[in-house]
Image (cartoon, grey):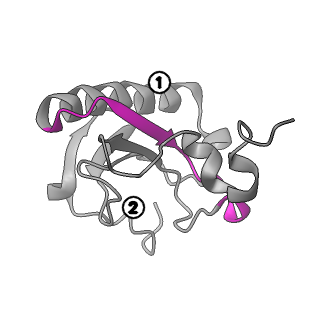
Amino acid sequence: MNKECPFCSLRTDRIIQENGTAFWILDGFPVSQGHSLIIPKRHVGSFFEVNAEERVGMLALLDEAQKWLSSKYQSEAFNIGINDGLLAGQTVPHLHMHLIPRYAGDVSDPKGGVRWVIPDKADYWSRGE
């Protein structure tokens, strides 16, 4: 536990569901309705540092969150992502997995999805190569 970490010191009333190794919350700065975070209970920075039990716990909550969001908000598509390391855009040094519900019309053209983290490389389908 890190007292300065926003996820280690999170108010328990923000937790939607938890298991032995992870918990699920709604993102404090959502990019879409229902944007959720799956977070290991142990303070760890990288997905590559969690153990098998923690991965199973995180993925179990990911499944639960997807079912709940599909039912509550009728979302039919999702982006799932982890910013792992400073160069990948990680701003909170405690691992967290984003589950971002997507909705018809939320962007003009969703093609490419997560490839847009590097915009100049995202649109490979229209280069004519």
Q: Vertical placement of 34 versus 119: above or below?
A: above
Residue that mark 2 sits on? 8
Residue that mark 1 sits on? 56
Residue type marked 2: Cys
Residue type marked 1: Val
Q: Vertical placement of 44 versus 63: above or below?
A: below
Whole-percent x, y for residue 33 in the image? 23, 51
Left or right of residue 4: residue 47: right
Quadrant of the rendered image containing residue 28 = bottom left
Tell me the residue at 52%/43% (across/down).
81
Q: Which residues are magenta?
A: 73-88
Contact flag, marks 2 and 1 (Cβ < 8 Å): no
Left or right of residue 102: residue 1: right
Left or right of residue 72: residue 116: right
Spatial CA distance of label 2 from label 1 is: 20 Å
| Farthest residue, direction bottom | 4
Q: Vertical placement of 108 versus 101: above or below?
A: below
Q: Nearer the viewer, residue 38 or 31?
A: 31
Whole-percent x, y for residue 102 in the image? 34, 41
Whole-percent x, y for residue 116 in the image? 62, 51
